[in-house]
Image: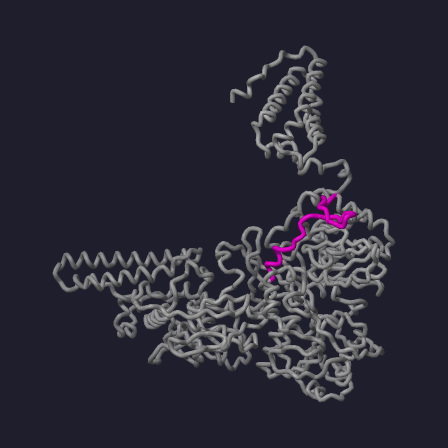
Amino acid sequence: MAFTLRGLKVSPNSASLEEARSRVFDFFKTACRSIPSIMEIYNLHDVVTVSQLRSTIASEIRKNAHIDNPKVIDLLLFKGMEELGNITEHAKQRHHILGQYVLGKQGLVQDSSTKDEGISPFLKSFYETNYF
Amino acid sequence: MNKVFNRRTLVVAIEVPILLLNSDRRDRKREMGLGIFTSMLLRRTIIQRSTKLLSPQSPIFNNSFVRPIVSTPELKNPEAAQADPVPDSPPLPPRSPVGGARVHFPNPEDAIEVFVDGYPVKIPKGFTVLQACEVAGVDIPRFCYHSRLSIAGNCRMCLVEVEKSPKPVASCAMPALPGMKIKTDTPMAKKAREGVMEFLLMNHPLDCPICDQGGECDLQDQSMAFGSDRGRFTEMKRSVVDKNLGPLVKTVMTRCIQCTRCVRFATEVAGVQDLGMLGRGSGEEIGTYVEKLMTSELSGNVIDICPVGALTSKPFAFKARNWELKGTESIDVMDAVGSNIRIDSRGPEVMRILPRLNEDINEEWISDKTRFCYDGLKRQRLNDPMIRGNDGRFKAVSWRDALAVVAEVMNQINPEEIVGIAGQLSDAESMMALKDLLNRMGSNNVWCEGNGMQTQADLRSGYLMNSSISGLEKADVFLLVGCQPRVEAAMVNARIRKAVRSNLAKVGYIGPPTDFNYEHQHLGTGPQTLLQIAEGRHPFCSAITNAKKPAIIVSAGLFEREDKDAIFSTVEAIAKNGNVIRPDWNGLNVLLLNAAQAAALDLGLIPESNKAIESAKFLYLMGADDVNLDKLQGDAFVVYQGHHGDNSVYRANVILPAAAFSEKEGTYENTEGFTQQTLPAVPTVGDARDDWKILRALSEVAGVKLPYDSLMDIRSRIRIVAPNLLSIDEREPATFSALIKPEFPHSMSSTPFKAAIENFYMTNSITRASKIMAQCSAQLAKK
């Protein structure tokens, strides 16, 4: 376990919201830079594209867009760093990545689009499964 | 003394494993057996102890080492049987008949009374002792007796004691006489059964652990219930050479106990003389007399009637044990009969199909196509929506994309050029949805394959089997018009054969030369003969007019002919002249070919124009694989919704995978108007969906949303169109007879009738994908 903590240091708290914001952007850039190596490590070329993974990361970050407390943002950043470290160190296996970032909570991430607005519950469940 | 003892224990050790297969039932029995065994041991130790106390050197003590050979030592002396040592047992409450059977008294004066185990039962004259016991609620063990076959009386397992009879009597062959006192539970009867069991097991191999019948074997069950718990057999067992009966029935003839059920079934029900009994005494064996396969369309039923593992299913051999299978009661869709079946599945796989009892339709038999088509459900399946790309290859896409493409194309095409064809395996719900969808798009060119163009669907009597399948048994003259019941509907053929055997019914046949398994007259091959009969110029006319219950059966294969209306009005003329339609008997029948036909005509799936396919720009095939698409225009857009990659897929532009009959709940109406439902036995394959759900989803994507979201909703829609499709397991006869139809003046062409089915074993997409059916048509089909 020790190696996961190597090179990882808790940065000092962000002084202001602006500083926290810029750190989030830095984190996003770091994550995006590591996508090619992640694709290589987990052999994701035939299931997902770089841009899809990038938008998954972005949407994971956007999930917390409403948070305006710098301390909380720092905490979330730390967790994000840890997760990224785990992924790039191959501490996870392929199905972890597939389950968490390639397939979303509702089936294939790439399948869910904005076209679904306004369709009936029948059609929505029809696209998912035969048994409803 | 010691030597004898050792040998006997050895024999016990060999003979007992026959019981060691586990199922729920078997477990219960084994517990029971062990309980008896332990109580016997306890009793013996008590006796030993007491004798020890009394006189250790007494001869009784020494003898107690000798294990008695029969399990019930008190039966050893024959006088015990007469003594009847249990006078004080409390009277049992009267039992209800076995299997809830009801007794029908054709003539109330003929009722006689017999006593079974002291209880009086009323039975009609002519019942056997065994039937009387069944009415009294006593199940008599049997091997050779089968209620639908003639009586052989050769297994002797059904021995019971009858008062004032010197010997036990074989109850299956002994007619019950008034006042007879039958005892089924006396020491004499028990001993007789035990003895018979011992003889049967003498030459029966101890291979239950590798026998496919294990767990559902009559011999296994009855040896548990009535057999001895030890054997005294030391010699070699007899062995018999296995016979080759074709690709369906596997034989292990050493296991055969010579009950001759299969021989009687083949000669009486199936009507083939292929099986027989050869040799005498211990050399007796069942076989085909010469090296020959069993060529009957009902041959699979010998697997069910064989009480041991001598005849088992070849495709099912070593695949599964019966206790690990889940049974689903469903309906067969291979032909228009709608045989009742049980689909046995393990996980997502259909392992076998067995018949279910329905006296009105299939009795307890099913055809080989029904029984062995199931391996087709695992091959050639469509599992993803697919779109044909520019290179002509199919590419798997999501449902979203597939439906969007279909809806877009459908909306760009003139309503008159949209055509829908339902396949022969479609259920009523999906056909309703297909018709509603096309009607909402503005088209009314929708029909079911096999029904032809412009078929008269106004009167239900015009396309149903009006005398009902079981009613055919009562007929005494048959006129088959272009109809080969043996391949078109094997179960209907079995009924006709039954009528020929029991009523000596005459059968006249008009059509191409074909195979019959009963006596028949080949009257002619084409419409001319029909015209002769209608005009009274044919000798067969007198047979029809003189008959008590004449039946005319017209094949639905004639629906495809141009002059079908003329043919039908000629047939109606024959019916009128021969007085075939009476208040109490309607003998004018149509024998349909496909499971979907009757429901399709009930729902009004009739095309608007005769040239629908030629002018189609958008063709929606819902499992339709037997339509001729040669005349279709090259630029027409074809959607195939179905479960198998069969004929039509070659022409399709989009494939929408659907569920097969074993995977969905659907309503089917059989050829006599009997409505039944299938139930899902296994999950759907891949990304497939139920047929009606696909149509409902497509309608929403295309912007003409259908107003139903569930099977309940769609059935309430059907209630408006054809309410008879909702009364499940009921036969809705036609209200008006065909006689009110106006005469049709057109003349018939002279083209002779064609065979409706070329190959019995391959008639739809499931059977065409089946390996077993391919073997059958290679080896068994008549060339």
First to last magenta residue range: B373-400
| A104 vs B708: above or below | above
- B665 to the left or right of B219: right
* Residue B391 within the segment the image draws in magenta: yes
Task: Residue at 34% x, 60% y: name it.
Answer: B16
- Residue A132, horizontal then vertical, whole percent: 66, 46
Task: Residue at 41% x, 80% y: name it.
Answer: B179
The answer to which of B158 and B531 lies nearer the viewer is B531
- Residue B726, horizontal then vertical, whole percent: 69, 60
* Residue B169 within the segment the image draws in magenta: no
Please identify the quarter of the rendering in which residue B72 is found: bottom left
- B88 to the left or right of A112: left
Q: Quadrant of the N terminus of chain B?
A: bottom left
- Color theme of the render: one colour
The answer to which of B614 and B92 lies nearer the viewer is B614
- B202 to the left or right of B24: left
Judge whether residue B183 can be spotted in this image.
Answer: yes
Please identify the quarter of the rendering in which residue B560 is found: bottom right
- Residue B116, horizontal then vertical, whole percent: 41, 73
